């Protein structure tokens, strides 16, 4: 016994509504995947700044253990090594940079090209003033006691070329790394 013709065609295919539901579900899953991948990429880029700031802080403490002061590795807090903040990575060793010798003396090494530009200024409280304009809205603890050495380290990058930087800052008086504009 065979089924009528209209029942046979219904059993073999999908309705338009079923196909639309499948397309919507696939679209939602694709959107979630894109968001997840973007977060993963931004987190990996941010990890560079956190790692390098930790390396700079360790190098500064090593330098202080030998010389009883921190090294002023940058001309100022907005002179970035090895490059100005931008969208592209660059090699860590940049002999043409005016602060190359200071960074070389500090002994910080990157495992490869870097996305961020780094600045590290240092001085002695009471005679040298820590930078007041750090480029973030966050107040970073900076010691200013007379005779106490200090340093401030800053990492900055413009991931998407919109002139808004991701900024990471720390100092010798805190183990925290403050950030603003993560993923900008």
Image (cartoon, rainbow, N blue to C red):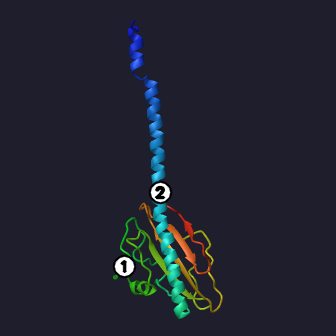
Q: Which residue is mark 1?
A: 93
Residue 21 screen position, x and y as percent: 47, 30
Q: Which residue is outermost to the top?
A: 1
Residue at position x 41%, y 62% from top?
Answer: 161
Residue at position x 52%, y 78% from top?
Answer: 153
Residue 88 screen position, x and y as percent: 37, 66
Q: Secondary structure at mark 2?
A: helix
Circle on res. 40:
2
Residue at position x 46%, y 54% from top?
Answer: 38
Residue 91 screen position, x and y as percent: 36, 74
Residue at position x 46%, y 35% from top?
Answer: 24
Label 1 Cα crowd, 10 Å radius (few <14 / some 14-19 / many 20+): some
Q: Quadrant of residue 45?
A: bottom left
Q: How many marks?
A: 2
92, above or below 4, in the image:
below
**Camera sees residue 17:** yes
The Cα–Cα distance between marks 2 and 1, rounded to whole angstroms, is: 27 Å
Q: Please name whichever residue, 33 or 90, is drawn nearer the observer in this view of the structure.
A: 33
Q: Which residue is outermost to the front?
A: 1
Label 2 Cα crowd, 10 Å radius (few <14 / some 14-19 / many 20+): few
Residue 27 screen position, x and y as percent: 45, 39
153, above or below 9, in the image:
below
Q: Quadrant of the N terminus?
A: top left
Query: Mark 1 or mark 2, which is nearer the start of the sequence?
Result: 2
24 to the left or right of 170: left
149 to the left or right of 119: right
Q: Secondary structure at mark 1?
A: loop
* Proximity of marks 2 and 1: CB atoms separated by less than 8 Å: no
């Amino acid at each position: 016994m065979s089924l009528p013709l209209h029942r046979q065609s219904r059993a073999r295919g999908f309705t338009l509504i079923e196909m639309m539901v499948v397309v919507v579900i696939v679209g939602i899953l694709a959107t979630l995947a894109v968001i997840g991948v973007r977060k993963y990429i931004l987190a990996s880029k941010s990890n560079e700044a956190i790692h390098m700031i930790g390396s700079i802080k360790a190098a500064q403490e090593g330098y202080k253990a030998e010389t009883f002061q921190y090294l002023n590795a940058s001309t100022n807090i907005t002179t970035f090594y090895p490059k100005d903040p931008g969208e592209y990575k660059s090699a860590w060793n940049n002999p043409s940079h005016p602060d190359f010798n200071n960074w070389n003396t500090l002994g910080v090494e990157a495992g490869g090209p870097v996305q961020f530009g780094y600045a590290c200024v240092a001085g002695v409280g009471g005679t040298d003033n820590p930078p007041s304009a750090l480029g973030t809205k966050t107040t970073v603890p900076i010691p200013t006691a007379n005779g106490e050495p200090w340093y401030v380290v800053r990492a900055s990058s413009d991931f998407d070329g919109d002139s808004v930087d991701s900024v990471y800052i720390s100092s010798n008086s805190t183990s925290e790394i403050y950030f603003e504009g993560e993923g900008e």
